[in-house]
Image (cartoon, grey):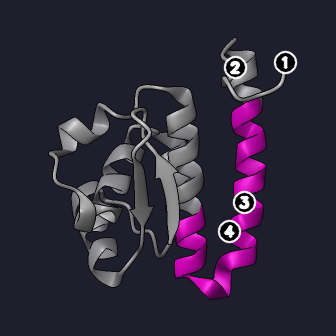
Amino acid sequence: MTIFKDRDGREWHIHYTFRNAKTIRQKTGVNILANAITPVMEDLFLLPAMLYYACEAENEMTLTEFEDKFVDLDVIDDGFDAFVAGIAFFTPSRRDSILQSLRELKEQWRKMTETAGVMPENSSE
């Protein structure tokens, strides 16, 4: 299980099961058991919905209300880390390669935000 915080500081617990993996696939079209990282990097708007369904058991709000918690770059960054780490622990046979991919994607994300002139608040200047 992995944890991330929304913009209000509420902690959310990601605990993947086959049931919510199936729900994520049905609702977003992304199969987290195959390759979830690439679709999210290509369309970051998928991330809140995928996290919403991964946290469904503790979620008492609508998807739209949940998405409203993802307006800050730091929240998106934290949510992405938790999302990928959750997948790594859900699929232990692929854990090392998934975590290596995450490190590489984080570096790409850092370079992309620097190029765009957007710096995450928690990064060093």
Q: Which residue is mark 1?
A: 125
Residue 75 vertical placement versus 12 (above, below): above
Rounded to the nearest whole Å, what is the CA distance between mark 4 and mark 3?
Answer: 5 Å
Q: Which residue is mark 4?
A: 98
Ranked by sequence position, the earlier of labels 1 and 3 is 3
Rounded to the nearest whole Å, what is the CA distance between mark 3 and mark 2?
Answer: 22 Å
Residue 72 vertical placement versus 62 (above, below): above
Q: Which residue is mark 2?
A: 119
Helix, strand or loop at disc 1? loop
Ranked by sequence position, the earlier of labels 2 and 4 is 4
Ranked by sequence position, the earlier of labels 2 and 1 is 2
Task: Classify 10 Å Cα crowding around label 4: few (below 14), some (14-19), many (20 and above).
Answer: many
- Assess whether mark 4 and mark 2 are in contact (beta carbons under 8 angstroms): no
Residue 53 vertical placement versus 66 (above, below): below
Seen at 27% across and 41% down, the residue is 66
Q: Amino acid at mark 1?
A: Glu
Q: Looking at the magenta stretch, what is its main secondary structure?
A: helix
Ranked by sequence position, the earlier of labels 3 and 2 is 3
